[in-house]
Amino acid sequence: MRTAATVLAIVGLGCLLSACRHSSDSAPPVPAPSLLSQEPLFPVAPPTTAEAPRTQAPSPSRSASPSPAGFSDQYVTYCNGKPSGEQVIAAVRLTRGNLPAGSGVSVQKQPVCSGVWQYTVLSVADSEPLRVITKGSPTALTVVTAGTDPCTADVRLNAPPAFLAAVDC
């Protein structure tokens, strides 16, 4: 009886060790990115790359060609100043007159782009961070939404899937 228990313990230990070895061969889990941190959202191309990895497979109904703004809607990447954080602040100021003047508003997270959509996080004095979604060319931005929850019906229906994933909609 004692021999059977010993054999069973050895076999169980072997199974555990092989499972541990087998699971260490696979890629480690990736922690969820924080939209308020300075870490990139999802796989984001470095500012100098021409094309970034895709966050999901392209769908047949969408083209992989760049938008008029120069960004594909198949992935999310830094906007590289097209638009700049200051352009986003100016667009928000046009639609929301209650933003503090001067240094009361600053860019917390630089804009990321997907197609003609942009996402920026602004710091507002004495307030929660302002999550802003804009659309259009850098010189003619339209504020789609600005607030603590940018996932409006318009955004969910019209934004590219990779963008929705990056914004957590």
Image (spheres, rainbow, N blue to C red):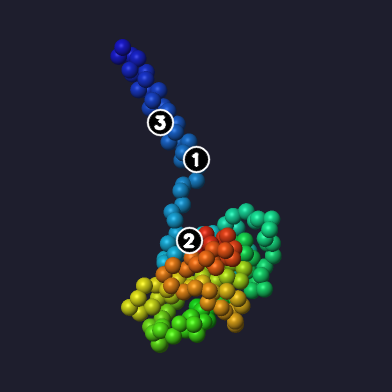
Residue 58, position as x, y percentages in the image: 65, 56
Residue type (three-letter) at the residue carrying disc 3: Leu
On the question of residue 41 being in view, the answer is: no
Q: Compare residues 150 and 9 and report the one nearer the observer.
A: 150
Q: Earlier in the sequence, mark 2 or mark 1?
A: 1
On the question of residue 146 being in view, the answer is: yes
Residue 117 image label: none
Residue 16 image label: 3
Residue 25 image label: 1
Look at mark 2 in the image and give the residue it sits on: 168
Residue 34, position as x, y percentages in the image: 42, 62
Q: Is residue 61 left or right of residue 126?
A: right
Residue under the point 45% across and 36% down: 21
Q: Residue 60 lies in what quarter of the image?
A: bottom right
Residue 54, position as x, y percentages in the image: 60, 58
Q: Is residue 51 above or below residue 104?
A: above
- Label 3: element kind: helix
Marks 2/3: CA–CA distance: 37 Å
Count of numbered circles on the image: 3
Q: Is residue 153 above or below residue 55?
A: below
